Image (cartoon, grey):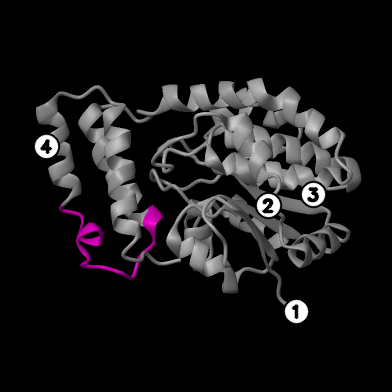
Amino acid sequence: MLIQPDCIPCILNMTIKAIRNLSLSAEAEQNLFSEILKIPGLRGMNWNQTSPVIIETIMTLITKAVHDPDPFLKEKTHLNTQALNHLPFLEKLVEESADPLYTAAKIAILGNSMDIMMPGGLSSLEKFIVEKLEAPLPKDAFEQFCRQLSKTRQILYLADNAGEIVFDRLFIQTLKKQYDVNIVFVVRSLPTLNDATLKEAEDAGLDKVATIMENGIDGPFPGTLLKRCSPKVQGLADESDLIISKGGGNYDSLSEEVQDLKAPVTFMLLSKCHPLNTRFNKSLHEPVMANFFKP
C-alpha cells in the first residue's frame, strides 16, 4: 500500500516518540529531526512509495546519529518480557475456547498492538486483548484460511514486532496441533524500530515451534519485499503452500508485489489507521484477516 496523506503525520509522530527514547541532547534531537524533515516522502514530494521505505531512511539517519545499529534493543527486550508474562493467561484463553485456532489467530493479530507506531501505547495489554477478542474475524476469511491449511505442508511466516512474536508462537503451536505443517519464521536481518530480529525470536521461544530465518534484506527496512530478501527466502516463498504476513509494515510492502507471488497469502494485522480502516472496512484497532488466494 503506497503512502497516503495520513501516513506523513503518523510517521512523524512515530519518529518523535522513537527519538525521545534515545537520550539525545535537545540540540542533537533538533539536528536529527531537521535531517528527517528533508526526506522527500515526508514533504509530499513522492507518493509512489510505501511507509517502510521512508522509515528505512529514518532508521538509517537515527542509527548514524546515535552510533548504534540497534537503538531500540531495550524496548524490544521489554516488549518480549511483557508478552511472555502474559503467555500463561493467553494459553488458558485458547485452551478453554470453543475454537482454539480461531481464538489463537485473533490473539496473534491483537499482539500487533505491541508496536512503536502506536502513538498512545497501551496501559493494559491484557485488558485490551480481552476487550478486543469480542471483535470477530471475518467468517469467510477464516474459513478460507482453514481450507488452505488443510492442503498446506509448508508455511512461510513473516514476523513483525518483538512482543508480538510471543503471540505468534501461541498461534503457531495451536495451528500445529491441528495441522501437519512445517513453518519457517522469518525475521529482520537488520534491526529497525522494535521489529523482531533473530535475537528476539530466540528469546521468545520461536525456535521451539518453527525454523527461524533472517530475511536477508540489507537495510533497516520495517517490512517485507521479497525481491530484496535472500535467494533462500525467495525460494521458500515460491515453494511454500501459504505465506502468513503479520503486521502493517509487512502488509504495506508485500501487498505491492502480491500479484507476482506464486503462493497464496494471508495478511493478519490490526487496523491502526484511517487508510487501513478504509481498505478493510474496519474500525480503529480491529483485527484484520485478509486472504489473497489466486483461483
Q: Secondary structure at mark 2?
A: loop
The answer to whether the residues at label 4 and label 3 have Cβ atoms under 8 Å apart is no
**Dot placed on the residue nearer the N-terminal end, 4 or 2:** 4
Q: Please state the extent of the stretch shown in magenta in the rendering.
A: 38-52
Residue at 20% from the left image edge and 24% from the top image edge: 24
Q: Amino acid at mark 4?
A: Asn
Residue 189 visible within the image: yes
Name the disc covering residue 135, or none: 2
Return the residue found at the far bottom. 295
**For the residues marked 1 and 3, what is the alpha-carbon distance in whole angstroms?**
24 Å
Packing grade of label 1 (10 A; few <14, some 14-19, many >=20) is few
Residue at 24% from the left image edge and 57% from the top image edge: 42
Q: Amino acid at mark 2?
A: Ala
Report x, y in % for residue 276: 49, 62
**Dot placed on the residue nearer the N-terminal end, 1 or 3:** 3
Q: Amino acid at mark 1?
A: Pro
Report x, y in % for residue 72: 39, 28
**Dot placed on the residue nearer the N-terminal end, 2 or 3:** 3
**For the residues marked 2 and 3, what is the alpha-carbon distance in whole angstroms?**
12 Å
In the image, taking residue 91 as reference, residue 84 lies left or right, namely: left
Residue 185 visible within the image: no
| Residue that label 1 marks | 295
**For the residues marked 1 and 4, what is the alpha-carbon distance in whole angstroms?**
52 Å
**Disc nearest the viewer among 1 and 3:** 3
